[in-house]
Structures are given as C-alpha cells and as structure tokens.
Amino acid sequence: MGMTFFPGTKQNNKFWINMSSTEIDLRHEMDVILGGGDGDIQRGHWVAYRRFDLTETSEYYDPSTGTGKGGPGWEYEDEFYLARKVNFSSIYNEQGMPIGVLPVPFTVFYFEHDLEPKTQDQIYEFTWADNSVTPTSSDITEYTERFDIKAVKRMRDITGRTEFWAVVATGDKTSY
C-alpha cells in the first residue's frame, strides 16, 4: 500500500476534490490557471496556434528551396487557445558557458490537454483587449510576435492520460 503525499489534506484542499487520495487533477488545475475560476484570476492569454498541413503546398511554395517565398510554404489553419508563457534564457551565465556553446533564449508555452501540437507549427501572439472573449481570425489584424515550435512535451499523469502540453519555441522576428 502506498503512502499519500499530503496526509490529512484531502478534505480541505481544492486539489483533492473528486480525486483518489493520491492524485491531483492536473487538467482541472491547468483550466483554472489558464482561464481563471475557483476564485483565481486568469493567468493565460490568447494565442493563435498555426497548424500547418504539410500535404498541401501554398501559393508561396518555392519547389527549388522547399520553403515559402513571400509567405508560408504550406497551407495552414489558425486556431485560438489560452496559453501560459514562460521566457527562459540560458541556464548558464557567460562565465559558466562551456567553450563553443552559445546561449539561446527560448520560450515555453503551456497548453491544455486537447491541443496536439507539432514541431513544424507556429505560435503567434497578438494584442487582445478582453481575454474573457475568444478571438476569431477576422478579429486579429496584426500579430506582435511569431514563435517557431522546436520541441513538444506531452505531460502525462500516472495512468498515461495527457494532462497538459509544454511547447518549447523560439521567437522569430523574420518576416516572409
């Protein structure tokens, strides 16, 4: 028989509501973090997740380079999600960097379990006045920053269920 991590807290702690004595409902907690609720403020902001279809080239596709020229090379759809963004720089300071290693700043976006991100997709940030209202493509006139997804990590619970996603991305100021 296993030991509980926090004995005696099940009755008084919101993490334990409707759960077994040894697990936290991370899906619910991510929902609260991103969208607010349970008396907490909303900590997520809306981003456009650009999902590329690598089976369909766009009008900008250049077969000589295999990339887009003047626009994205592949057809895509923009989807809108609440995300939590955390910026990181190098884990080393300049004096602690091994010779030949350059620090690369990166950003981690946290998303709820239903996103299914891929490394070839992109994340776009934009200015949005009211985070309580879900934006649509026609609402967005200008993106403020583009991020290329470099790594995707599915965060699972002990049963293997996807609880949330951690998406590592680098900012890209390059325009088409």
Image (cartoon, grey):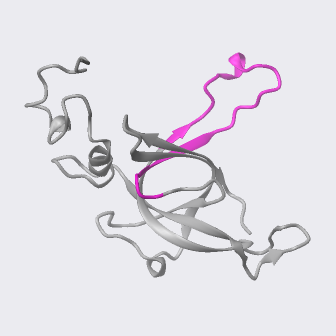
Q: Which residue is found at the position 70% from the left and 32% from the top?
A: 103
On the picture, is 73 further left or further right than 7? right
Q: Is residue 11 magenta?
A: no
Q: Is residue 93 above or below residue 126?
A: above
Q: Residue furthest right?
A: 64
Please give the name of the residue rendered at 15% of the width and 47% of the height, measured from the top-left corner. 39
- Quarter assignment of residue 81: bottom left
Q: Position of residue 111 (x, y in %)?
A: 43, 51
Residue ID at (84%, 67%)? 66
Magenta residue check for 102: yes
Which of 23/80 is in front?
23
Residue 12: x %, y % from top left: 9, 31
Q: How many numbered dots are placed on residues in this image?
A: 0
Q: Check the image and name the residue furthest to the front.
A: 1
Image: 108 above or below 134: above
Q: Quadrant of the N terminus?
A: top left
Q: Nearer the viewer, residue 157 or 109?
A: 157
Q: Residue at x 60, y 34 (%)?
A: 89
Q: Quadrant of residue 6?
A: top left
Chain part drawn in magenta = 86-115
Q: Is residue 103 left or right of residue 167?
A: right
Q: Position of residue 83 (x, y in %)?
A: 42, 53
